[in-house]
Image (tube, helix red, strand yellow):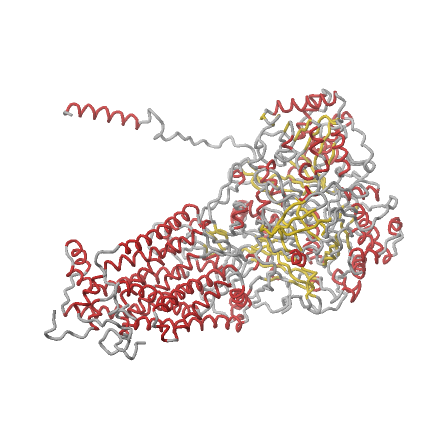
Amino acid sequence: MNRRNFLQALGIGGGASALSACGLDNNRYYTPVENVVPYVNRPDQIVPGTATYFATSVHTGPNAYPTLAIHREGRVVNVGGNHKAPVLGGVSRYAFFEVQRHYSPDRLRSPKAAGQDVTWEAARGQLADLVKSARAAGKKVAYLGGYKGPTLAKLIDTFTAGEAVFWEPLGREAEARAAELMFGQRILPRYDLSGAHYVLSFGADFLGGQWGGQWSQGEFARARKPVDGFVSRFALVSPHRDQTGANADDWYACAPGSEALVARAVAKLVADKKGYTGAAAAWLADADPAAAASAAGLDVSALEAMAATFAAAPAIALPGGVAGATASATELALAVYLLNVVSDAPGFGLGGFTGPVHGIARVERLLADAAAGQIGVLLLDEHVNPLFSLPADAKVAEAFGKVSLVSLSSHPDESSSTAALVLPCADVFEDWGDEEPVTGFHIVRQPAGVSLYDALSLGDVLLSTWRALDPSAPAGTWREWVQRRWMSEVLATPVVDALSGAAPGAESAAATGMPAAADPAATPVAAPAPPSAALQRQWEQVLSDGFFARPAFGQRVVPVVTGAPVAFTGVAAMTGSGEYALHLFPHAFLADGRYSNQPWAQEVPDPLTGHVWDSWVHVHPDTAAKLGVKDGDLLEITTATGKFQVGVEISPAGRPDVLAVPFGQGHADASGRYAKAGVNPVTALSVTKDAHGSMAWQQAKVSATAVGAQSDVWSTFGGDSDLDRKFVGLVSAEQLAGGDAPHGETRFAGPMLLDFHDAPWDARLEKAGLFDMYGAPEHPNYRFGLSIDTNACTGCGACAIACYSENNLPVVGKTKVREGREMGWLRVNRYWKPRRDDEGNVDPSQMEAGFVPMMCQHCAHAPCESVCPVLATYHTIDGLNAMVYNRCVGTRYCSNACPFSARKFNYHSYQWPEPFNLMLNPDVSTRTMGVMEKCTFCVQRIRRTKIAWKDRGHTDLVADSELTRLTACADACPSGAITFGNLNDAEAHVTQQRRSARSYYPLPETNVFPAVNYLGRATFHRKPAAHHGGGHGDGHAAAGGAHEGGAEAHGAEAEPHGNEPAAAPAGH
Amino acid sequence: MANHHAPAGVGIDPHDPAAPNRPGTYGEANRDIIRVLLTPSASFFAMLGGSVAAFGLFVWAVLMMFTYGLGTTGLMHPNMWGVMIITFVFWIGIGHAGTLISAILFLVRSRWRTGIYRASEAMTVFAVMTALLFPVIHLGRAWQVYWFFPYPNQRQLWVNFKSPLMWDVFAISTYFTVSAVFFYIGLIPDIAIFRDHATGLVKKVYGVLSLGWRGTSRQWHHYMGSYGFFAAFCAPLVLSVHSVVSWDFAMAPTAGWHSTIFPPYFVAGAIFSGCAMVITLLLPMTYIFKWEPYVNLWHFENLAKMCLLTSGILTYAYFMEYFIAWYSQNPYEQAIFIWRANGDYAPQFWGMVFCNCVAPLLWYYRPARTNIYSLMVVSILINIGMWLERFNIVVSSLAHNFDPATWSYYWPTNIEWCILVGSFGWFMMWFLVFCKTFPAVAITEIKEMIPPPLKGKLE
């Protein structure tokens, strides 16, 4: 190469590379233009970085409670408690699952016809064609769905001309049927627990979600707090204890199927005691307490004790729910009504859920009609999944094969995946609607965020289809329909006796009479009157408040027995020949299985057993020894019609002759990627009804054999006992009857090594003879603290789930949970404590479950802080134990030093599969592999509250009212058991609770000066043996004169009858 | 501690019938020891290859950990420490015997240290190098390890001097530095001998390393002064390092950890394991390298006696932990100690008791402690027992912490076993390379033991 060639090559090469560097030929090295666009035209109500709250409602079964949807930049990211609402508020655990369901990656994004995605337009057209051709052929258009709010139920009923069935597998049909038989109205009664000194439950899952949820939980929790001068005593008559039953103070483990006998016998005893002579006396004529006691395997004195306590104090009895759904389910409900009626239980009235509650008989008739070809189109709503929740002999698939099945579910499941046409309707955060869970209490539902997939609401689908078929159909959108009904019925007519008119679609007579098909033209919406300005304002206020209480709410509708007595059969019959009774109970989180595809519902440990991502069977320790199984072994359970295998959980929660399996697991692939866990016990059952047509779930005698293999069930609970380490603080209930006033002496048995109450720091140290090397931390303004009332806590787990939602906790899946990597910052510990009688003897049949929510205790002397080499965790001036994720190097020493094991480590970097990432709380950073994390007392909420307080012009410290339910757990707790606040404020609720005589600190010996205190759990003593004292002494704790319910009755009359020593049972 | 039969100035016990070859002359000493450094055999390369391969496992396991997170280990809530911390304490413990033998026994003029102190010191330095890997790799974010060091930085971040881990940083880095320097100082005259015997590039390297050692009287004067100084400097470190390591546990309020007995108990355990490891390492070397004139049963018997003493201390400490748990009436301590002996980790506990308390008792019988097979077997048992001891301390207290609801069961994964095996590979790799490059028996000190050559017998 000579000089010229070299220069030529240099010129060409240099030029070419210069040109390519300019990005002319490709954009690989080219920075894309990014324009900063000012957010001038921002949508109304959206301020970036600020949450907006929409008052709405989330419902599960008949239970609904006002809820706030927390909205950020167009999306619902969380739910919070609407604390304007009555009772204790909080958030149902299921509301969080609805948020996760909203963002589920398995959610259907567009309508499908024959498996192919179609437009909404086309899908609606197809639906209209289907309905048209069905009607033309003289066939019916039917609907099958869960319990619905009044407006939607009415629309559906109208659309289907009365062929709508509102049924839930774990629903409350027996109660509705019993009310029909006894009171002549098919309605769910209202059980107000807030004034009840004695709650006698026959298996009701009233602290679970579907039965009563926040209503009964909040009322019950209120009665568990001694502020009203009494502490309610909860007695359970059931062969098994579920999460609700675990809270029972007295457990009468009756033989399976004998609940109705016991209830009726107790009613008889109460009637005799009270000299009752009313209309219900005829129902009790032939009740025989001695025979009932012997059939139930109980001592007759136990029945007398129940009756004595029931008669002496304001008490209420609750029917069975799923646990009582035996072959005498309706009889049990009748007997419980009798018990309430004869004692005139002040909380019992006819003002519960007003919507239609249909029974299995209606479903069977629907399926029979379908199989007979009488039904052209069957609309299948979400939350009802008959192919999953009904036994094979219901022949659901055959019936579905004969109809044009149209699924309205936004999520795939076993049933909807067989539908020819799928219209994934808007979910609870995208739709309008309303609820009336208790007569007179109306809750509005409104869209709280953008519609993720532009789904149409069910109401709009029905209305537009109706209009496509019938030009004279009412105009307007579903939103207008809801609004019009509120204005014309709820707001405009404030005093309506909702009970006088039968609820839409209610069965008028037993299982035979068909309701008259409603005439569309006769509906009130057909001729809307323009709303007045006052009504308009009231409507807007409702949208802001989220609820509206008519005067009917709070007025007790005294039930009048009008029906003729029915025959009571003996112990409920069971099919099969095994030696054990198969007991089904609702999974604490999955409800009837509807939330099984929500990772939180699977991952947050079951409050009673700690199980995750699986089914299990409760086996009594004696039975386990007999069967030769250990925790986690596979057990094969054989019914008359099938069998299934499930892992063993040895638990004192059931009688030795009972094997209890949760309902809700065992889904097929069609239900989504997270739902495939556990077994579905329903597959081994048959459709069995009691004499009055109610579903009998507790139907099978089974045999059980150890398979000899290990299952992969996994419980996160390490040990069942707190080994008297004071995680559970037991306080004698007699002493609490005087109220929760500050007290000089702690009421706990045995010395607390350090008395934390009130004394200044130095004095405390001096008292303990300690030398403090580093001095006390200074908290000039705030020292944030938390107080947890373990007597009000029912172990529902809402706090744990709220923490997952608020703090972006990753879900790690079953394999990783088994490896001990679950990330919950707040765990609800459950300890079984054997009850001791007054002589200190342990009664192994009376295990008490102590639920203790445990999280970072934000110690003033935190062992974790001093051991961190890089100061990643330190004490803030506000008393928080702060954790700086970015500074953490991951020595994990802090966790080892933490006496409460409250810290969690990121063993991996976790992912949120799209679109779960949209659900993340923008205020909280997600953490990566290798750092520790733990409860922060929701520091982001503290910051937000402080800033908002300042913005409102205050210069002082944030008021206590702004703080008490600030943290996500406190906000969510439906029991109001968690109180947050500033411990420096002597008047703050949290400080007062800390000073309470029942305040205690787990592990006081560790001398860590925690910011979290617990309030002790009331324990009710028993006489050494049941036959000892009979009724009166046993009922001493729920003593008290005529208590009218409510807050007026302050402790004056609450005087213990007995003179038992005050020693708490934890023998030291 | 020295055998009273040993006459002054002689490297071996003349009354010991097992002593076959008495060292003859300075030249023989040079020759015998330098012979070891001659061309390595195939078996040497096989051993070295095995060690490097084992270390390869370690590297693979650590890369897996760094890539996928500590979830690849068996660590779990609340059992946050496992094999890596156990093995860290194990190697730190091994690293105690060398300095003890070379420094403390030097200061008390125990002559039997001469033959074995070099190899023990090398063992110490390499064991501490091995131990140092663990505090780094066990971190959740090992790439941030430099945050442990308090140096003025732009991030304006500082460290927490209250943290026992911070004390570890100083204690272990000090110990490593001082041990390494002391080790090197002792090597200087020997390196000079190598330099004098070597040629070519090797001579240059040894030349630089010998720091110009000529063996003048003035140099010897300074050398002995500084050696004595470092010996005095090292002696307290032997006690302090493992005390500080024990505080990693004792400073946390965890039941089973939070105990004042930990520092002496850990130091005794460290010396116990270190002496056992010296026996395990030197016994085969003595016979492979034919060092019988310099290292023989006299030394091993004395090491065995050291083990017997420290085994007694440990047994006492184990007993004392139980006694105090009972005497204090602390329910948490009681629960953890009852559980250690009866719970999920009972095999490890009883294995520890057998290896550390029972098996060494054999050595009270003199023929047993002068028998190479019994020495070898029991010393290996002691090493296993000391690893199990750390397993018991670290794991059982965490697995059954205060809150019964969080109790868990930790068991290591293959990743952790690879790390454990790999750490031996790393240690042996350095030790084998050392044996072939530096005298594993101190030539100059051996010569001090040999009677001065008489006139006319000079070679």
Exactly how many numbered labels are in the figure? Answer: 0
Rendered position, B384 above or below B7: above
Residue B458 position, x and y percent, is 11, 71
Which quadrant holds residue B125? bottom left
In the rendered image, the quadrant that contains the C terminus of chain A is bottom right
In the rendered image, the quadrant that contains the N terminus of chain A is top left
Q: Viewed as shown, does residue A921 lie left or right of B430?
A: right
Q: Viewed as shown, does residue A570 lie left or right of B295?
A: right
Query: Which residue is nearer to you in this view: A828 or A625?
Result: A625
**Quick one: which residue is furthest to the left in this view?**
B456
Whether residue A491 appears in this view of the structure is: no
Residue B394 position, x and y percent, is 46, 61
Residue A383 position, x and y percent, is 66, 37
Rendered position, A27 above or below B163: above
Query: Which residue is drawn at the image coordinates 63% and 66% (left, top)?
Result: A746
Rendered position, A787 above or below A395: below
Residue A355 position, x and y percent, is 74, 38
Which quadrant holds residue B170? bottom left
Q: Viewed as shown, does residue A873 lie left or right of B228?
A: right
Query: Which residue is nearer to you in this view: B361 or A687?
Result: B361
Whether residue A994 appears in this view of the structure is: yes
